[in-house]
Amino acid sequence: MRRRLKGIAVSAAKEHTVRVRVASVAQHPKYKKRFMTYKDFLAHDETNSTGARATVVIEETRPISRRKRFRVVYAAVAKTT
């Protein structure tokens, strides 16, 4: 089973590439306080339709380039307020 992650598209400036920020909750081992950690992944977007601030589901795949190891499975359009 391939790993799937949900995050927010931070940047879509490059051709067929989206930078996705994935958040997770961690707990301090001694003080037991919870805090957010973030990691950015580069994902392949074949249709080049994902914009910044969109909610994205990415899936692990074969290496596409030096840093791209994920592809976009689903992208929801960002709502502007």
Image (spheres, grey):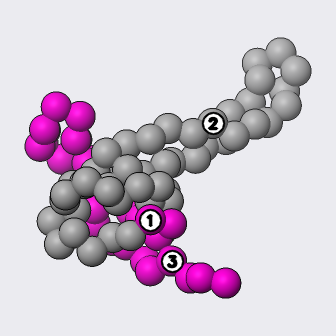
Residue at numbered disc 3: 78
Q: Residue at x 59, y 82 (%)?
A: 80
* In this rendering, position of residue 24 left or right of residue 69: right
Residue at image coords 47%, 55%: 10
Question: Circle 2: is it few (<14), some (14-19), or many (20+) Cα within 10 Å?
Answer: few
Judge by depth and name the residue closer to the eye, 80 or 23: 80
**In terms of sequence position, does the residue under pointer 3 or pointer 2 come before the other?**
2
Residue 71 is at least partly visible in this image: no
Viewer-nearest of labels 1 and 2?
Answer: 1
* Residue picked out by circle 2: 37
Residue 52 visible in the displayed image: yes
* Residue 44 falls in image quadrant: bottom left
Residue sitting at 38 percent across and 63 percent down?
57
Q: CA distance from mark 3 to mark 2?
A: 22 Å
CA distance for labels 1 and 2: 20 Å
Quick one: label 1 or label 2, which is nearer the N terminus?
A: 2
What SS does tag 2 mark?
strand
Residues packed near mark 3 inside 10 Å, few (<14), some (14 to 19) or many (20 plus):
some
| Residue 23 image offset from top left, x and y in percent | 58, 47
Which image quadrant for residue 76?
bottom left
Task: Say left or right for 17 vs 5.
Answer: left
Amino acid type at mark 2:
Thr
Which residues fall within the magenta stretch? 52-81
Q: Does the magenta-highlighted stretch encompass residue 53?
A: yes
Please report the residue visible at 17 percent of the width from the left and 72 percent of the height from the top: 47
